[in-house]
Image (cartoon, helix red, strand yellow):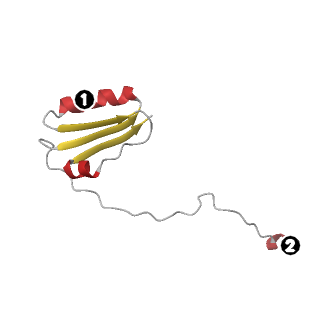
Amino acid sequence: MAKKDTVYKCLNPVGIQESVETFPLAPRLDTLNGKTIHFSICGEPDITIPLEKQLKSDYPDVNWTVKKTYDTTPIQLSPEEMKTTDGVVLGVAW
């Protein structure tokens, strides 16, 4: 077989991308005063505790609801919480 007749076969390392359902961004809130904001950050408590204190002191007129976990799985909102929450701060910290 000549050099130009050589056929190489390989697998794409990226794999096959499955399609995902996308949603548009929610509209921005005009003000945070009087709104209910859900705060859920999981991971290291040494990062989340100062952030929570800072947000509460910077925005005293916001009704904060807080859920914490110290593993890396974000806490999901219940359907009732989704109906009553105006915004969400959701993150993972290592």
- C-alpha distance separating marks 1 and 2: 70 Å
Q: Which residue is mark 1?
A: 54
Identify the image quadrant of the N terminus. Answer: bottom right
How packed mark 2 is, by other alpha carbons closer than 10 Å (few <14, some 14-19, many 20 or more), is: few
Hey, what amino acid is under mark 1? Gln
Specify the quadrant of the image occupied by residue 32.
top left
Q: Residue furthest right?
A: 1
> Which x, y percent locates residue 38?
25, 42
Q: Which residue is mark 2?
A: 2
Specify the quadrant of the image occupied by residue 51.
top left
Hey, what amino acid is under mark 2? Ala
Tag count: 2
Rendered view: 85 above or below 71: below
- The residue nearer to you, when weighing 81 against 48, is 81
For image coordinates 67% across by 62% down, the residue present is 11
The earlier-in-sequence mark between 1 and 2 is 2
Name the secondary structure under disc 1: helix
Identify the image quadrant of the C terminus. Answer: top left
